[in-house]
Image (cartoon, rainbow, N blue to C red):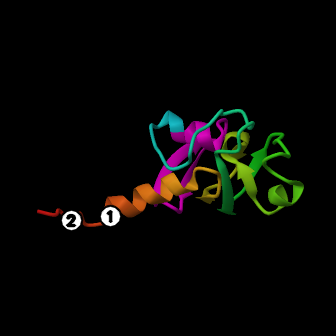
Amino acid sequence: MVRYDILIEDTGETYRCAETRSLLEGMEALGRKGIPVGCRNGGCGVCKVQVTEGSYVARVMSREHVSEEDEREGRVLACRVRPTSDVHLTVIGKMKKSVVRGVETAGAPTSHST
């Protein structure tokens, strides 16, 4: 089975994804985080990502969440695409704020008031 390296640019997280799994399934199978998880079937749009590098095979996606232009430009649902090479992506779905906020707060110094 062929596996590809997937980089979530927002968090710096990387994981290996088998060619038989969607980008979302591969992330979940390894217990990783970075791409928000919703319905897992393309109906909610929560896992929308921008593929910035690499190639993939896409299954049918709801036009409510991914327009034809989006798809041509690499804006896809992570639950509906399987990698065919190493992939770099950024999160652009509805839950992007929670992904980016987690990274920003993880590296920020904490302050305590007395």
Percent position of residue 27, x then y: 53, 42
What type is the residue that disc 1 sits on?
A: Gly
**Residue 39 visible from this viewpoint:** yes
Is residue 75 inside the magenta stretch? no
Q: CA distance from mark 2 to mark 1?
A: 13 Å
Can residue 53 be seen here? The reply is no
Q: Which residue is mark 1?
A: 107
* Residue in view at x 73 percent, y 41 percent: 80
Q: Is residue 28 above or below residue 34?
A: above
Highlighted magenta segment, given as a residue range: 1-27
Q: On screen, 56 above or below 44?
A: below
Q: Secondary structure at mark 2?
A: loop
Q: Quadrant of the N terminus?
A: top right
Q: Badges 2 and 1: C-beta atoms under 8 Å apart?
A: no
Residue found at x 65% / y 45%: 46
What residue did someone put label 2 on? Answer: 111
Q: Position of residue 112 (x, y in %)?
A: 17, 62
Q: Residue furthest right?
A: 68
Task: Say few, some or many: other residues with alpha carbon within 10 Å of mark 2 (under 14 / 14 to 19 / 20 or more).
Answer: few
User: Residue drawn 79% across and 63% down?
Assistant: 73
Q: Nearer the viewer, residue 56 or 3?
A: 56
The amino acid marked with disc number 2 is Ser
Nearer to us in this view, 18 or 36? 36
Up the image or down, 32 lies above or below 54; here it is above
Quadrant of the image occupied by residue 2 = top right
- Residue at point 66%, 46% (across, down): 78
**Label 1, residues with CA under 10 Å away: few <14, some 14-19, many ≥20:** few
Looking at this view, name the residue that lies furthest to the front: 114
